[in-house]
Image (spheres, rainbow, N blue to C red):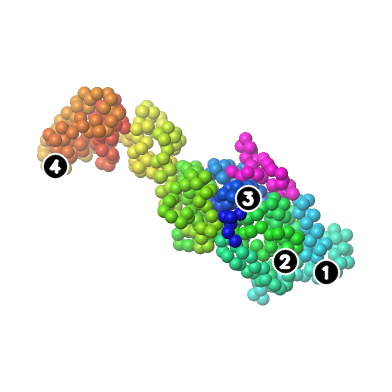
C-alpha cells in the first residue's frame, strides 16, 4: 500500500513520560509529523502515562520543549502553550491518565463479549508460573489459569473484592498477518502471543488497551513507531477485531545502532535531545541528522529545511535495516549549519559558549566578532569552545608570558646576535603597523600588503615568525595578518 497517495493522514507521537526525549523518540515524532504534513493531515501528540511507577516529574514538559526546539510541533493533543503543557483538539483528553473511564468501558465490553476475562492470580502465583515456564523452556507468559474459571467463581471472587486484572483472551490458533508499510508482510502465530493484561488492578489500562482505544478514537490512520513494538502489533490487531474497528496502518522504524551495530547506547549518542542543544547543536543540524537515520531522499542532497523534508519524505524510502548513529556526521551537519548563520546570530551563539575568563577580558567585545570565523574553523559545536579554550584561543584574551628563545627564526639559530636582529625586525614591523591607516586594520589583505615589503627585505620566516610569536606567545596560531586583524591596533602595538 502506498502511503504517499493517502490524503489526510493522521499520525500521532505517543511517548511515555518515563524519561527525557531521546533521539530515537525525536525520529519517530519527526517521521510521524512528516507523513501527516505531506498529506495535508494532522499530527497528534498523546501522552501515554499509564505506567504510574515509571512516570517522571517534568517528563511531559521535557518532551514538549524538545519537540518545539526541533520545530516538530503537534497540530492537536498535548501542546506547549506559554511554556506549559496544555491540550488542544476535539478528541481529548490526550493524556491517558485522564481517560480511565473510557478504557474501563471497553475492557468491560470485551469481558461481556468473551474476548477478555478476569484474572485473580496473585503476584506469588504469577512468579511461580514464570519459574515453571522457564524450567520447562516455555516462552514467558501467562498460563491461562483464570480463563477457565466458571461464571459463579468469577462472581464470587468479585463480590468478595478479590484483587483482579482483565486479560485479553488470545485465540489458541490462527495467524495474524499484516502489511507493515516498511517491512512488508509480517505474520505472527496467535498461539505465540500471551494473554495480555488490558486493565490493571489499580484501574489503569495497560499500553495495549489504551493505544488501540485511543488510536481509534483519535482517528489515527497511520501508526509510526519503533521496531521494538512490532511483536505487540498482533495483540493490537486482535483487539481492533474484537472491538469491531478497522485497524490503523503500521510502519515500524528500523532500530538505531552503534557503529559496531549493537543497540544504540548512551555512550554513543542515545542521550536526551536537550543535551544536544546544551552542547551547541543547532536544531536544523539535529533534525537533518535524525531525518537521515533510516531515510534518504534517493539522491545526493543532505540538507533540508523542515518544509523541504515534508515534501521529500516517504515511507517507501525508509530502510528496513538498522540505522547506524554516526556522531561525526552530526558534527558535520552542525558545522554546515553554523556556517550558514549570519554574523549577528553567530556572535550570539559563540558568546553563549565563551568561558567567563574570556568574557572578563577588557578586549572581549572587540575581539570576539573578529575571532569568531577563525574559531569556527576549529570547532563543530559550542561546547568545544570551552573544552579547547586554552589550546586554541586563550591567548587572545589573556596575556601570556613570552619565551624569547621562541622568537628566533630557525635560519638565525646559530647567529650569536639572533635575538637583537630579531628585535630589530619586530621593531620595524611595529613601526609599519603604527603608521598604517586606521581602516587597514579591518582588512587582512591591507595588513599583509603593508608588511610584505619587510618580508621581501629580510625573509618571510625571519619577519613573520617572530611577529606572530610576539602576538600569540605560541608556536602555533593563525598567521600574523590574521592575528593583527583579530587583536586590533591598540592590542597589537602593546603586545609587540
Ligand atoms: N508509549 C509508547 C512509547 O513510549 C508508544 C508506542 C506506540 O507508538 O505505539 O514508545
Q: Do tag 4 and tag 1 residues touch (Cβ < 8 Å)?
A: no
Q: Residue at x 45, y 62 (%)?
A: 260
In screen coordinates, is 132 left or right of 304?
right
Mark nearer the N terminus (2 vs 3): 3
Q: Position of residue 361 (x, y in %)?
A: 38, 29
Q: Residue at x 38, y 44 (%)?
A: 379
Q: Provide the residue span drawn in magenta.
A: 73-99
Mark nearer the N terminus (1 vs 2): 1
In screen coordinates, is 139 left or right of 299?
right
Magenta span includes 82 = yes
- Look at discs 4 and 1 and give the one toward the viewer: 1
In screen coordinates, is 459 left or right of 70?
left
Q: Which residue is mark 2?
A: 195
Q: Residue at x 78, y 58 (%)?
A: 107
Q: Which residue is mark 1?
A: 149
Q: Residues within 10 Å of mark 1 (few under 14, many from 20)?
A: some
Amino acid at each position: 500500500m502506498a502511503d504517499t497517495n493517502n490524503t489526510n493522514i493522521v499520525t500521532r507521537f505517543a511517548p511515555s513520560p518515563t524519561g527525557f526525549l531521546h533521539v530515537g523518540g525525536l525520529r519517530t515524532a519527526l517521521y510521524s509529523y512528516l507523513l501527516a504534513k505531506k498529506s495535508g493531515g494532522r499530527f497528534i501528540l498523546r501522552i501515554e502515562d499509564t505506567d504510574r511507577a515509571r512516570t517522571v516529574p517534568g517528563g511531559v514538559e521535557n518532551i514538549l520543549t524538545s519537540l518545539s526546539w526541533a520545530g516538530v510541533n503537534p497540530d492537536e493533543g498535548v501542546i506547549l502553550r506559554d511554556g506549559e503543557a496544555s491540550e488542544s483538539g476535539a478528541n481529548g483528553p490526550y493524556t491517558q491518565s485522564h481517560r480511565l473511564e473510557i478504557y474501563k468501558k471497553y475492557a468491560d465490553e470485551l469481558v461481556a463479549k468473551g474476548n477478555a476475562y478476569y484474572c485473580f492470580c496473585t503476584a506469588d502465583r504469577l512468579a511461580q508460573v514464570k519459574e515453571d515456564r522457564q524450567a520447562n523452556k516455555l516462552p514467558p507468559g501467562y498460563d491461562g489459569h483464570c480463563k477457565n474459571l466458571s461464571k459463579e467463581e468469577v462472581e464470587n471472587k468479585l463480590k468478595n473484592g478479590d484483587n483482579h486484572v482483565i486479560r485479553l483472551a488470545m485465540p489458541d490458533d490462527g495467524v495474524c498477518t499484516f502489511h507493515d508499510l516498511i517491512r512488508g508482510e509480517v505474520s505472527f502465530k496467535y498461539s505465540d502471543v500471551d494473554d495480555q493484561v488490558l486493565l490493571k488492578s489499580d484501574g489503569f489500562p495497560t499500553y495495549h488497551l489504551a493505544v488501540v482505544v485511543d488510536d481509534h478514537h483519535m482517528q489515527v490512520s497511520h501508526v509510526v513507531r519503533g521496531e521494538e513494538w512490532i511483536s505487540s502489533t498482533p495483540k493490537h490487531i486482535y483487539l481492533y477485531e474484537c472491538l469491531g474497528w478497522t485497524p490503523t496502518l503500521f510502519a515500524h522504524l528500523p532500530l538505531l545502532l552503534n557503529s559496531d551495530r549493537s543497540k544504540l547506547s548512551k555512550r554513543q549518542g542515545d542521550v536526551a535531545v536537550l543535551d544536544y542543544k546544551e552542547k551547541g547543536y543547532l536544531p536544523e543540524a539535529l533534525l537533518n541528522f535524525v531525518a537521515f537515520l533510516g531515510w534518504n531522499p534517493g539522491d545526493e542532497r543532505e540538507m533540508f529545511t523542515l518544509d523541504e523534508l515534508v515534501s521529500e519524505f516517504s515511507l517507501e524510502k525508509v530502510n528496513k535495516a538498522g540505522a547506524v548513529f554516526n556522531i561525526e556526521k552530526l558534527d558535520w551537519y552542525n558545522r554546515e549549519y553554523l556556517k550558514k548563520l549570519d554574523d549577528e546570530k553567530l556572535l550570539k551563539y559563540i558568546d553563549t559558549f565563551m568561558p567567563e575568563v574570556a568574557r572578563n577580558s577588557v578586549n572581549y567585545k572587540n575581539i570576539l566578532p573578529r575571532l569568531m570565523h577563525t574559531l569556527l574553523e576549529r570547532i563543530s559545536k559550542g561546547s568545544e569552545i570551552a573544552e579547547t579554550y586554552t589550546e586554541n584561543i586563550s591567548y587572545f584574551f589573556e596575556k601570556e608570558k613570552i619565551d624569547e628563545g621562541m622568537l628566533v627564526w630557525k635560519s638565525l639559530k646559530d647567529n650569536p646576535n639572533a635575538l637583537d636582529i630579531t628585535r630589530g625586525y619586530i621593531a620595524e614591523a611595529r613601526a609599519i603597523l603604527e603608521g598604517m591607516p586606521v581602516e587597514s586594520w579591518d582588512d587582512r589583505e591591507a595588513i599583509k600588503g603593508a608588511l610584505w615589503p619587510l618580508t621581501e627585505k629580510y625573509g618571510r620566516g625571519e619577519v613573520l615568525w617572530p611577529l606572530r610569536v610576539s602576538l600569540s606567545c605560541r608556536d602555533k596560531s593563525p598567521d600574523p595578518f590574521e592575528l593583527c586583524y583579530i587583536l586590533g591596533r591598540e592590542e597589537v602595538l602593546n603586545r609587540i
